[in-house]
Image (cartoon, rainbow, N blue to C red):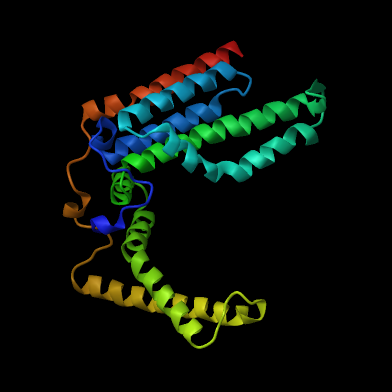
C-alpha cells in the first residue's frame, strides 16, 4: 500500500504524536473515550478538563483548532437530535429564556453533545496523526481479529481500483444517453451497481487465488508491518492522557 492511499484526514508532520507507534495511539484513544463516557453528566467541570487534554494533544500534534472544528461537523445530526431533548423530556421543568424545558432533557442534551464532541475530537486526532496503513498495522499488533484487518487491508489497497471502475461505468452510461438524475432511470443505475459488485467479486477471487499461488497464508508478511512494535517507554508516554482522563472520571464519580 503506497503513499497514494493516505486518507484525507491525515496531516503529515514530524510531531511527537506522529512519531508514536500506531498501536499505542489507538489504545490511548479508546481508553480516553471510555473515561469520557463513564463520567457522570452532572460533572460539568470534568468535560472542561477533557477538552484541555485534547487541546494539549492537538498542540503537540500541530493540529490547529480550526481544522479540528471544521471536521467536527460530522456529528451535526446528533447535535440536532440533542437540541430536541429539552423540549421532549419528561419530569421536572425549568424556564430558560422564556422556554419551558425539561431538566432531564437538558442534561441528556449536554451528555450527548459533550461526550460526542470529545469522542469525535479524539478520533480526528488519531486520524490526523496516523496514516491508514499504520492504523491497520496498529490494529494487527493489538491482536484485532485477522479477518477484519485483512478485509480492511484489501479494501484500502483496491479502493481506488473500484472507484475508477465505477467512474468508467458512469461515463459509459452517460455517453449512451443515460442520465441518473431522473427517477425513471434508477433501474439502470441499480443494474450498474450490481455489475460493479460482480466485477469486484470476480476480481477479488482472482487476486486471492493469485496470492495463494504465491504462498499467502492468511496473514501479511512481517515486512509489511514496518518498524518494530512500541517500547515500554512509548506505552508509558501514550498512557499519560488516558491516565489523567481516568483520574478525572474517578474524581467526578466520587464527587457527584
Image quarter of residue 109: top right
Residue 117 locus on image (x, y percent): 53, 34
Q: Is residue 13 left or right of residue 110?
A: left
Q: Is residue 63 above or below residue 149?
A: above
Image quarter of residue 24: top left
Front-most of 214 and 19? 19
Indicate the quadrant containing the C terminus: top left, top right, bottom left or bottom right: top right
Residue 142 locus on image (x, y percent): 32, 42
Q: Residue at x 30, y 57 (%)?
A: 5
Residue 249 locus on image (x, y percent): 51, 20
Indicate the quadrant containing the N terminus: top left, top right, bottom left or bottom right: bottom left
Looking at the image, how many numbered discs can be counted on the residues?
0
Residue 90 locus on image (x, y percent): 81, 31
Q: Residue at x 30, y 72 (%)?
A: 208
Front-most of 3 and 197? 3
Q: Residue furthest bottom?
A: 176
Q: Is residue 209 left or right of residue 242?
A: left
Q: Is residue 135 above or below residue 235?
A: below
Q: Is residue 81 above or below residue 211?
A: above
Q: Residue at x 49, y 31 (%)?
A: 34
Front-most of 225 and 95? 95
Image quarter of residue 241: top left
Q: Is residue 34 left or right of residue 92?
A: left
Q: Residue furthest top?
A: 255
Amino acid at each position: 500500500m503506497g503513499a497514494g492511499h493516505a486518507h484525507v484526514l491525515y496531516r503529515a508532520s514530524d510531531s511527537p504524536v506522529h512519531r508514536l507507534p500506531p498501536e499505542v495511539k489507538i489504545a490511548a484513544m479508546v481508553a480516553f473515550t471510555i473515561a469520557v463516557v463513564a463520567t457522570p453528566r452532572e460533572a460539568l467541570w470534568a468535560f472542561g478538563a477533557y477538552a484541555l487534554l485534547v487541546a494539549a494533544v492537538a498542540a503537540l500534534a500541530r493540529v490547529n483548532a480550526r481544522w479540528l472544528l471544521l471536521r467536527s461537523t460530522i456529528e451535526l445530526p446528533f447535535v440536532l437530535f440533542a437540541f430536541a431533548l429539552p423540549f421532549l423530556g419528561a419530569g421536572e421543568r425549568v424556564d430558560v429564556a422564556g422556554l419551558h424545558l425539561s431538566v432531564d432533557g437538558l442534561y441528556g442534551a449536554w451528555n450527548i453533545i459533550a461526550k460526542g464532541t470529545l469522542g469525535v475530537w479524539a478520533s480526528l486526532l488519531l486520524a490526523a496523526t496516523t496514516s491508514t496503513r499504520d492504523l491497520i498495522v496498529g490494529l494487527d499488533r493489538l491482536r484485532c481479529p485477522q479477518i477484519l484487518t485483512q478485509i480492511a487491508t484489501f479494501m484500502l489497497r483496491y479502493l481506488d481500483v473500484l472507484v475508477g471502475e465505477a467512474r468508467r461505468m458512469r461515463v459509459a452510461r452517460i455517453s449512451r444517453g443515460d442520465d441518473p438524475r431522473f427517477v425513471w432511470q434508477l433501474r439502470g443505475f441499480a443494474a450498474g451497481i450490481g455489475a460493479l459488485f460482480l466485477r469486484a467479486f470476480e476480481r477479488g477471487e482472482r487476486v486471492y487465488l493469485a496470492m495463494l499461488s504465491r504462498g499467502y497464508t492468511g496473514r501479511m508478511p512481517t515486512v509489511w508491518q514496518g518498524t518494530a512494535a512500541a517500547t515500554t517507554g512509548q506505552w508509558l508516554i501514550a498512557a499519560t492522557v488516558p491516565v489523567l482522563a481516568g483520574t478525572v472520571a474517578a474524581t467526578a464519580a466520587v464527587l457527584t
